[in-house]
């Protein structure tokens, strides 16, 4: 029983970060309809910003986090302005190829600047875990879960409760009408991509110190983010959050009770099942198809 | 028009041939190591060790009157890439001998290429038994296979009072081979073997596996993987309140790096290693060890990398000694000469003995294995 409780705690901690990865991508992939292959590298970028700011500039850990988010926002805006804006209106394949190119170029850049050897970030949290009866969890991970939950709520409110969010939704439903209503469409494109990117960077900045930081760290994260978005339904923030927790649960229980060798396969088995039985994702309205 | 195009490949070929001839001023050794991906840290250390050996050899006049040149390629911690890199080094760079490829799965992927091009390779790190038992006569291994590690460990299991052990292994030839060889040894000693948990080579979150291991009735966990994953395991085990004894194998732990990155979580852990940079006087060749460590520090590398890099140093010295003995930089002659060398390695004399099916034996030297323990952030030796 205590083992099961520990798996549930692990699932909560892991699911929070998966959810964060998922909502960033669902904004870009789901709402903007850009197959964003740079999501993983923005995650990596966020983690390296943490490393630079904490270890090379000597800034406090908690101040470094917002800096990484801002850096992710700026890099995202730069990608949108330089690559996506000239391609707006071209077909999804062209954009996808350009994004694959950007991913490879940026990953090679990271390798060139920082080298292939993993780096780690020291944190101000105590090494001794928080023990709650039969289960225990590290303080750093609790902090990551709390920060992820906060970012998810802020993003949800931003999309669903603010004028900017309303303009974003309107723009990607019907650009022309939104533009006639006085929405600055160019600005909405850039800010949506930048917000999605800053969420990826935030996930990297939070998880980099939990794990280790290396140029390819974003690859697996990006694959999982795509899985979560598909699971939750394109463009659905609540769906992405729940999708993140479902993936984490499948991985934890799969590794704990089936076989740890197939841990990463568990999530994808669920995705395949979802795509067969409910191809629009678990939480999307059926009208999104086609 | 057609004619012109036919001439182009001919010119290209001529340039390639002339280029090859011009390069014959040096003697090349191909180095096939993971410089990116999951094993980047370890592979980079091995290459830095290899460079120290090459510089030392060149400072003493090179081999056969020519300069030694290392052609270093990145196999990206990926078996497919490792095979491609071997092919590139042999066919395009024309190296007569290789060193590589760090991981067992990487080395196993390279092995058919060695057969195809009849080129020998010094295996500096890999520990899967399969490498020297499947009948590849181009393999010359200086690292201990996991069976030798298990045999060395056998002597101390009574003192450690092992009753039941679980395994947490990297899910590739290295990890699976270790679990197999150690389980066999444990059973011979009457020690029960519990569950064997695996992790993907790129996995960063082992909490699920560790939670499961926390719940078993074993008192010891044998862990096999490289340093980056090991530090994560120690941190995550501490976060889960896992209090069992952890013993690691494989010699790619970089204990100082574990102490630096995992902190208090590293205390009480034991590691089977193949080099003792902390106690140069206790190594088989103290003088050579001291030279190597001094040179390593002089170049500003992290001391933690010594336990990994010495293999690159020994591997290149092994290959160079064979070229010198062969008298020419040709694969067949070097392969024959490898059987006759006897050099003072940092972890024992490197002399190859036959291993594997008769008629197509691989070479295997007999390096030492040590058990160290981390207590209060310090490394101490346990006698095997």
Image (tube, coloured by chain):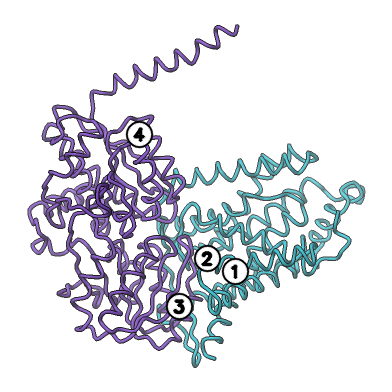
Chain colours: A cyan, B purple
**Numbered label attached to residue B210:** 3
Q: Mark 4 and mark 2: span between their CA atoms?
A: 41 Å
Residue appearing at x 55%, y 68% in the figure: A262
User: Does residue A155 appear left or right of residue B310 in this picture?
Assistant: right
Chain letter of the residue carrying label 3: B
Name which of mark 3 and mark 4 comes first in the sequence. Answer: 4
Question: Which chain letter matches label 1?
Answer: A
Q: Are marks 1 and 4 in contact (CB under 8 Å)?
A: no
Q: Nearer the viewer, mark 2 or mark 3?
A: 3
Whether labels 1 and 4 belong to a single chain: the reply is no
Q: Give the Cα separation between the discs numbered 1 and 4.
A: 45 Å
Compared with residue A52, is residue B186 higher up or lower down, i.e. above or below?
A: below
Q: Are marks 1 and 2 on the same chain?
A: yes
Disc 2 on helix, strand or loop? Answer: helix
The answer to which quarter of the image holds residue A199 is bottom right
Residue displayed at 32% across by 81% down = B245
Q: Quick check: B30 above or below A142?
A: above
> Tag 2 or tag 1, which sits nearer the N-term?
1
Give residue B371's mark.
Answer: none
Label 4: which secondary element:
helix
> Residue B358, percent across and down?
25, 51
Residue bearing the label numbered 1 = A17
**CA gap, disc 1 to disc 3?**
19 Å
- In depth, the one of A221 and B330 nearer the eye is B330
Residue located at (50% from left, 68% from top): A261
- Picture coordinates of residue A233 (x, y %)? 77, 64
Identify the residue position indicated by label 2 in the image: A207
From the viewer's perspective, is the residue at label 1 or at label 3 nearer?
A: 3
Residue located farthest toward the front when viewing the structure as drawn: B358
Label 2 and label 3: CA atoms lie apart by 19 Å
Which marked residue is nearer to the observer: mark 1 or mark 4? 4
């Amino acid at each position: 029983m205590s083992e099961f409780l520990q798996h549930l705690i692990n699932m909560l901690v892991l699911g929070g970060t998966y959810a964060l990865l998922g909502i960033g991508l669902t904004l870009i992939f789901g709402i903007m309809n850009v197959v964003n292959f740079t999501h993983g590298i923005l995650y990596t970028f966020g983690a390296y910003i943490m490393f630079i700011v904490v270890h090379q500039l000597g800034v406090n850990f908690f101040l470094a986090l917002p800096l990484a988010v801002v850096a992710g926002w700026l890099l995202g805006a730069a990608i949108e302005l330089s690559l996506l804006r000239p391609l707006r209106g071209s077909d999804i394949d062209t954009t996808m190829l350009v994004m694959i190119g950007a991913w490879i170029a940026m990953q090679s850049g990271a390798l060139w600047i920082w080298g292939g050897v993993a780096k780690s970030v020291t944190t101000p949290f105590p090494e001794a875990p928080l023990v709650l009866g039969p289960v225990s969890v590290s303080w750093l991970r609790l902090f990551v879960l709390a920060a992820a939950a906060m970012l998810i709520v802020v993003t949800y409110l931003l999309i669903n409760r603010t004028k900017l969010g309303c303009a974003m939704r309107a723009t990607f439903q019907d650009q022309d009408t939104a533009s006639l209503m006085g929405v600055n469409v160019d600005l909405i494109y850039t800010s949506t991509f930048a917000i999605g990117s800053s969420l990826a960077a935030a996930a990297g900045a939070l998880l980099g110190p939990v794990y280790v930081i290396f140029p390819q760290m974003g690859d697996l994260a990006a694959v999982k983010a795509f899985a979560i978005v598909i699971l939750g339904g394109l463009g659905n923030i609540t769906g992405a959050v729940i999708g993140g927790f479902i993936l984490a649960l499948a991985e934890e229980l799969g590794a704990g009770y089936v076989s740890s060798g197939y841990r990463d396969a568990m999530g994808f088995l669920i995705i395949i099942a979802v795509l067969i039985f409910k191809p629009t994702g678990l939480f999307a309205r059926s009208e999104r198809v086609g | 028009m057609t004619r012109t195009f036919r001439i182009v490949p001919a010119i290209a070929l001529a340039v390639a041939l002339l280029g090859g001839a011009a390069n014959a001023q040096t003697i090349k050794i191909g180095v096939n190591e993971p410089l990116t991906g999951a094993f980047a840290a370890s592979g980079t250390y091995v290459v830095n060790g290899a460079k120290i050996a090459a510089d030392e050899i060149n400072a003493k006049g090179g081999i056969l009157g020519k300069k030694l040149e290392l052609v270093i390629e990145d196999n990206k911690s990926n078996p497919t890439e490792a095979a491609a890199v071997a092919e590139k080094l042999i066919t395009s760079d024309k190296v007569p001998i290789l060193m590589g490829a760090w991981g067992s799965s990487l080395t196993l992927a390279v092995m058919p290429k060695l057969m195809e091009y009849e080129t020998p390779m010094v295996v500096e790190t890999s520990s899967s038994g399969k490498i020297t038992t499947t009948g590849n006569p181009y393999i010359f291994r200086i690292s201990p296979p996991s069976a030798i590690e298990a045999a060395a460990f056998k002597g101390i299991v009574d003192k450690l009072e092992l009753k039941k052990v679980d395994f947490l292994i990297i899910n590739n030839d290295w990890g699976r081979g270790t679990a197999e060889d150690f389980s066999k040894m444990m059973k011979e000693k009457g020690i029960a073997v519990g569950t064997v948990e695996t992790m993907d080579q790129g996995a960063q979150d082992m909490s699920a596996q560790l939670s499961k291991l926390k719940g078993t009735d074993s008192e010891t966990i044998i862990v096999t993987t490289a340093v980056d994953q090991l530090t994560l395991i120690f941190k995550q085990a501490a976060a889960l309140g896992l209090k069992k004894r952890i013993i690691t194998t494989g010699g790619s732990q970089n204990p100082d790096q574990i102490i630096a990155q995992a902190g208090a979580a590293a205390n009480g852990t034991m590691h089977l290693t193949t080099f003792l940079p902390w106690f140069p006087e206790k190594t088989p060749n103290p003088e050579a060890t001291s030279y190597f460590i001094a040179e390593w520090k002089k170049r500003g590398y992290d001391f933690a990398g010594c336990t990994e890099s010495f293999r690159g140093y020994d591997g290149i010295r092994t290959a160079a000694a064979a070229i010198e003995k062969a008298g020419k930089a040709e694969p067949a002659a070097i392969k024959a000469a490898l059987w006759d060398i006897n050099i003072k390695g940092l972890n024992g004399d490197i002399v190859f003995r036959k291993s594997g099916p008769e008629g197509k034996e691989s070479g295997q030297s007999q390096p030492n294995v040590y058990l160290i323990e981390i207590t209060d952030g310090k490394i101490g030796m346990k006698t095997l």
